[in-house]
Image (cartoon, grey):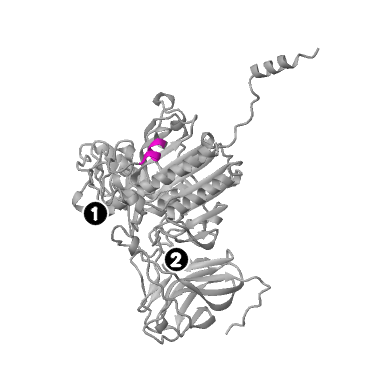
């Protein structure tokens, strides 16, 4: 007998809904650049207001003692791999030292292999050329820049999947627009969106609408050492942090608009301590330091309905923990191929059930490494103490300024941490770490490869436009005996079109220019001037000390070189200098030509 229709509908409403496998969670990782622990109002800084990041923390879990590296690219390497950065080939922040070894599997590759759409929008800083480029490290889409410093934050040239394009507006706003577009485009499939912001890293540039509040503001809270604080720099950094908070709000609003909030894990953290002396909870140390203030940063997890709101995680944790944590939260399948050992641990038990009785959490040490030339220093942190490279022992919770050395009072704890540092140094830091074999820059692993000035070596009178190699260009080229060289490895036999991105005044044109690789060369005369002004000073809110100002460099096609696989030195020379100096050089680009294009005969 058939039931009446109304009765059937009523029974259907009373029955439990059909269960389906939960959709994989989306991932949004936001990485601030040079933002200290104290640069958030939720941590007590009344000099600024960060309502969106604060709300993110209140809706999820706030890590109380989260440690990273003292500078940018090592932290990024640890996030990408779950491994301490000395294992990964990363040593520094420029001149190729930031490149992540190709044997490493990145977090993006893990999610990509699990069927996620992957995108990165911002500062990469772990290698420029393929196969080090983000598109070759697991990211389907990349929009941003690959070096550590960028000299101008308005209408900046950007890398979009290996091609140079023109950005629009304030850089981080532009990055956020592309990240939101990526999220919108992939709303119907799981996505892994990495948003490594470029602020509040110098140069200290920020739109008027955000700077107006701080231009003449008094600073109620000052740095640990007020005499070393630059108020101009601090005001600009605070304005940049409020702009960053606004962009975080836009990303979160986009998740709300697309009804993706409930099934998106959001992670927010920074790559090192503040890039200047400003209020940081009384902690000793800033960016570049192995003290608490240089290493402790904000870290927030939000996953509505999964991570209890208002959770404070007191256990010490680190950037190496992010990959295993997100992999477990997202239930990623185990990799099919054998993987390099992971140093981090999954924090998911602490996040999903933060009651202390639910899971005993073992004591652990977190290690932090600093490299300066041939000198290597290691600091260790456990749940209570920090051991400095000099052997001093501090309790940062009760003594954030590290004024009272407790090593004599706690000799056993001091010895235990010193032994742990010795084991770490032996196991994790490879013997050639301080004097590694030079690695060439890779050519031919993509259609077009750029060799920027920060990766070249100047000879003779040529010098960089600024102290920091990143974003610099070569200038003061006054002698025909001068040259610029790049150590390269050609990965694909082909004919390459060689072009130079240059600036040259009308008085200095007519330069016969040669590019040589081993016994092959191509040459042409540079006759077209390109003499734009340097940009950046007009937008600076505080004097810059590292970044170069920038210019609008134009490409000059020098000719073609038929190159075979192998390693050698690429040399750029001016055979004559008719004027006062040769051109200024931002980069050399080698474009692999299709076989249908007939190469010009080599001279």
What secondary structure do most residues of the magenta stretch adopt? helix
The percent coordinates of residue 73 (x first, y second) are: 41, 54
The residue labelled by disc 1 is 230
Left or right relative to 543: residue 341: right
Can residue 340 be spotted in the picture?
Answer: no
Task: Tell me if residue 510 comes above or below residue 494 in the rendering.
Answer: below
| Frontmost residue, 180 versus 39 | 180
| Frontmost residue, 237 versus 489 | 237
Please identify the residue farthest to the top as the structure is shown.
Answer: 1
The percent coordinates of residue 579 (x first, y second) are: 39, 85
| Frontmost residue, 442 versus 184 | 184
Asked if the stretch drawn in magenta spans residue 52, the answer is yes
Residues at discs 1 and 2 in contact (Cβ within 8 Å): no
Can residue 512 be spotted in the picture?
Answer: yes
Left or right relative to 170: residue 12: right
* Quarter of the image where the N terminus is located: top right
Q: Residue at x 68, y 16 (%)?
A: 11
Q: Which of marks 1 and 2 is nearer the N terminus?
A: 1
Magenta-colored span: 50-55
The percent coordinates of residue 516 (x first, y second) are: 51, 79
Question: Which SS class for mark 1?
Answer: loop
Q: Nearer the viewer, mark 1 or mark 2?
A: 1
Answer few, some or many: residues within 10 Å of disc 1's Cα (few below 14, many 20 plus, some between 14 and 19).
Answer: some
Asked if the stretch drawn in magenta spans residue 100, the answer is no
Task: Tell me if residue 531 comes above or below residue 314 in the rendering.
Answer: below
Identify the image quadrant of residue 401.
Answer: top left
Task: Tell me if residue 36 comes above or below residue 440 in the rendering.
Answer: above
The percent coordinates of residue 502 (x first, y second) are: 45, 74
Answer few, some or many: residues within 10 Å of disc 2's Cα (few below 14, many 20 plus, some between 14 and 19).
Answer: few
Identify the image quadrant of residue 41.
Answer: top left
The numbered dot on residue 438 is 2
């Amino acid at each position: 007998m058939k039931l009446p229709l109304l009765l059937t509908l009523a029974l259907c409403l009373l029955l439990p809904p059909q269960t389906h496998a939960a959709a994989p969670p989306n991932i949004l990782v936001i990485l601030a650049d040079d933002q200290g622990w104290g640069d958030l109002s939720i941590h007590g800084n009344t000099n600024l207001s960060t309502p969106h990041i604060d709300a993110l923390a209140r809706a999820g879990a706030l890590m109380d003692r989260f440690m990273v590296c003292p500078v940018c690219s090592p932290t990024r390497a640890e996030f990408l791999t779950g491994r301490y950065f000395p294992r990964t080939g990363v040593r520094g922040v420029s001149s190729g030292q930031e490149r992540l070894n190709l044997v490493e599997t990145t977090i993006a590759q893990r999610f990509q292999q699990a069927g996620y759409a992957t995108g990165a929008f911002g500062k990469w800083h772990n290698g420029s050329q393929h196969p080090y480029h983000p598109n070759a490290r697991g990211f389907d889409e990349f929009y941003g820049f690959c070096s550590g410093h960028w000299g101008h934050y308005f209408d900046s040239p950007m890398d979009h999947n290996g091609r140079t394009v023109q950005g629009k507006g304030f850089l981080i706003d532009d990055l956020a627009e592309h990240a939101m577009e990526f999220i919108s485009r992939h709303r119907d499939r799981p996505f892994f969106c990495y948003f490594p912001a470029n602020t509040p890293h110098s140069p200290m540039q920020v739109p008027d609408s955000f700077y107006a509040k701080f231009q003449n503001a008094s600073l109620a809270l000052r740095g640990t050492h007020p005499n070393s604080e630059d108020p101009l720099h601090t005001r600009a950094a605070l304005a940049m942090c409020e702009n960053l908070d606004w962009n975080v709000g836009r990303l979160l609003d986009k998740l709300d608009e697309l009804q993706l909030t409930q099934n998106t894990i959001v992670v927010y953290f920074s790559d090192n301590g503040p890039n200047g002396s400003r209020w940081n909870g009384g902690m000793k140390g800033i960016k570049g330091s192995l003290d608490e203030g240089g290493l402790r940063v904000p870290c927030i997890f939000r996953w509505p309905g999964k991570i209890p709101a208002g959770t404070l995680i007191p256990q010490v944790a680190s950037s190496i923990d992010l990959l295993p944590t997100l992999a477990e939260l997202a239930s990623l399948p185990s990799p099919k191929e054998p993987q390099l050992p992971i140093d981090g641990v999954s924090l998911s038990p602490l996040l999903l059930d933060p009651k202390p009785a639910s899971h005993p959490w073992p004591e652990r040490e977190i290690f932090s490494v600093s490299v300066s030339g041939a000198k290597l220093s290691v600091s260790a942190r456990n749940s209570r103490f920090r051991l400095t490279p000099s052997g001093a022992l501090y309790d940062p919770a009760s003594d954030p300024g590290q004024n009272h050395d407790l090593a004599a009072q706690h000799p056993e704890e001091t010895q235990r941490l010193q032994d742990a540092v010795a084991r770490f140094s032996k196991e994790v830091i490879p013997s050639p770490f301080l004097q590694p074999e030079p690695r060439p820059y890779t050519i031919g692993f993509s259609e077009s490869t750029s060799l920027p000035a920060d990766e070249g070596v100047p000879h003779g009178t040529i010098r960089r436009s600024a102290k920091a190699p990143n974003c610099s260009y070569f200038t003061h080229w006054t002698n025909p005996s001068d040259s610029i060289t790049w150590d390269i490895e050609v990965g694909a036999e082909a004919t390459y079109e060689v072009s130079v991105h240059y600036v040259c005044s009308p008085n200095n044109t007519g330069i016969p220019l040669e590019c040589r690789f081993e016994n092959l060369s191509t040459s042409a005369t540079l006759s077209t001037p390109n003499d734009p002004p340097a940009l950046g000073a007009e937008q600076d809110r505080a004097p810059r000390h590292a970044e170069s100002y920038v210019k609008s460099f134009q490409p000059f096609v020098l000719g073609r070189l038929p190159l075979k696989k192998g390693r050698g030195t690429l040399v750029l020379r001016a055979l004559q200098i008719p004027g006062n100096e040769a051109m200024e050089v931002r980069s050399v680009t080698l474009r692999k030509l299709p076989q249908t294009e007939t190469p010009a005969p080599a001279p």
